[in-house]
Amino acid sequence: MGKLIRYGFTLFLVLSLNFALPRMMPGDPVVNLLGDEALHNDPKMRAELRAEFGLDKPLHIQYVDYLKSLFRLDLGYSIHKSQSVRDLMAYRLFWTMMLVFPSIIVGAVLALLLGSWAGFSSGSRSDLFLTGLALFLYTCPPFLLAMVLVSVFSFHLGLFPLGNLTSGGKTGVEYIVDVTWHLFLPVVTLSLLGASYEFLVVRNSTVQLLEEQFVLAAMAKGLRERDILLRHVIRNVLPPFISMVALSFGFMVSGALIVEIVFSLNGMGTLVYDAVVARDYPVMQGCFLVLTVSVLVANLVADILYGIADPRIGGASSGGL
Amino acid sequence: MTGSGKKQICASDCKFETLSISGMIRIARQTLTASPLKLTGWTLLFFFLLMALLAPFIAPWDPRETGIPYLPPSSDHLLGTNDIGQDILSELIFASRVSLTIGLLAGIVSILIGVVVGLLAGYYRGWIEELLLAVEDMVLLIPGLPLMIILAAYLSPSMWNIILVVGLLWWCSTARVVHSRVLQLREMPFVEAARSLGCSDGYIILRHILVNTKEIVYAKFALAVASAMLTEASLSFLGLGDPLNISWGEMIHFAFSRGGFANDMWWWYLPPGLMVCLSVMGFVLISMEPKRSGKMLEL
């Protein structure tokens, strides 16, 4: 219950921030709400626009109007692209999620398996290699990894397409295969980025767990290493790991924005990039709102599922690793 | 953290630290030889610091001077030239100043906020703790990059705004760790003793509690700088960087948006990327615990 209030309050904060930013920040709110293109209009037209968008009304009335328009899913209009922001985002959000969800799952599985294995054999050569690799990936800016992968696998080896989501003109199974081929490298990039941090955490908590008495007991019983790892160690790493993965949703969305730009996928990232270049504020704000709300919803769902899966933590705030 | 941490705290609190230069050298040598990772980290950072400080002396060209564009690497221009004919190597060397300054200052901002929030929440408990933890939770829930993009886009593109934006949003993990440490510390006998002697809260926090969180704070500071540098690189890559102070991330932005990447000019985008990698790596490495090499500090 306390969690729900917290989520509600965060949502309220995000909505208010989105409302306040164009009105508070330096510059003319008309420009901030309509994009840089409005700047070229003459002052008279600007005043008309101000009246049309209700910017001359008192703030609390503007706020109510703003909430009403959100309720109608009206996210404003991009003069730059002459299209409503909602229509601009319609398919792009779907493709960004198509990139984020597989990456979260692949990254989490990789991190859990390799991390617990590296922690279990800590100090060995494979542990050193994996930890070094994870550390390197962790320090690697997302766009660099993406650029290197595109350059090596698409430019030079020609194994994967240079960008875009599909080659076009395909249907049915062929279409799905084609999309998978196009999404393969971006998903690999994003899962490696997500896995690197999770790997380090899993590895460290496994090393800590190995000092516990129950592992000693399991060893004394003569269980095989694989059984100790799978049945005793991973099971104890799992609960905090799941909550960490759920919380990584925001991080993955941030990473996806960058990765999309390098792979020129038609998702939210490229939309944000174009909007930043053109200083198209309505689009930026719409993206901020939609991305933030989807991260909030995803975290809320994960929290609820987690509460169902592990009744012990129920209402208490779950601590990270 | 629990058993050994307790012993450690008492020992460092009872012992009066004498700050002599030879003593510091001895301590430095001990920690460095105990941990080769730390040594590597310090070496990397020392290299970058030298590069930033000596930039005007080691850069072969003036990074602002323009010439023939899109030259491939040659003996004249070791890393070629960019779209307006500036020497990429010189640009790279001067960019280290911008990237490191932004990283360090944003790290300082975030660590200051994190430490103050952690100390207050842990020491005073009650509604202050509830409030600060709620704020922390909310900042953690909001995805960082979209918020930073929108803030940076509304503010004018300058180094200082980037420092502010990054610093203001990266304090949560510091606050969390300091908070849990302070919760342990405030129940310790020496804090109780200080309290019963009538010491004021401010005195206890500054002279007894803050001092004992310093190891965490140092480690978290290094990590905060690392995160800040990565975030700055992403923001600059998106074109939100300071056009007057080119950072490594911004160099990649130009390489990407002005044909360097599409034409496979790896000498343009790869070196600044590796610089970001290596300097972030340096900061991460120095934050690692010297003892018990099997464990690393929570990133």
Image (spheres, grey):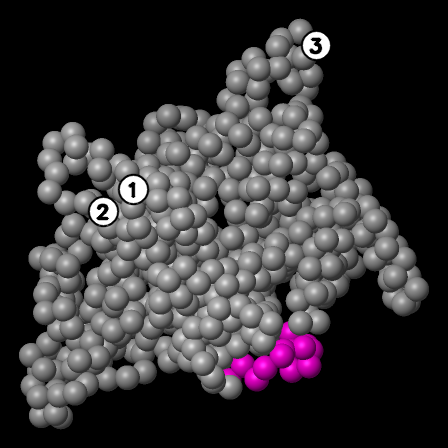
Q: Quadrant of residue A120?
A: top right
Indicate the amino acid at tag 1. Leu
Disc 3 element: helix
Q: Nearer the viewer, residue A97 or B183?
A: A97
A169 versus B77 height, above or below: above
- Left or right: B85 as drawn, with respect to A15: right
Q: Nearer the viewer, mark 3 or mark 1?
A: 1
Q: Quadrant of residue B70?
A: bottom left
Q: Earlier in the sequence, mark 1 or mark 2?
A: 2
Discs 1 and 2 share one subunit: yes
Q: Nearer the viewer, residue A171 or B294?
A: A171
Q: Which mark is residue A165?
A: 2
Residue under the image location 35 percent in, 56 percent down: A262
Indicate the amino acid at tag 2. Leu
Residue under the image location 24 percent in, 84 percent down: A28
- For the N terminus of chain B, give its image quadrant: top right
Disc 2 element: loop
Count how many numbered circles sit on residues in the image: 3
Residue for badge 1: A183
- Left or right: A112 as drawn, with respect to A204: left
Residue for badge 3: A220
Residue B57 painted magenta: yes
Q: Nearer the viewer, residue A307 or A30?
A: A30
Residue A75, percent from left and from top: 15, 62
Stretch of the chain drawn in magenta: B52-64
Q: Are marks 1 and 2 in contact (CB under 8 Å)?
A: yes
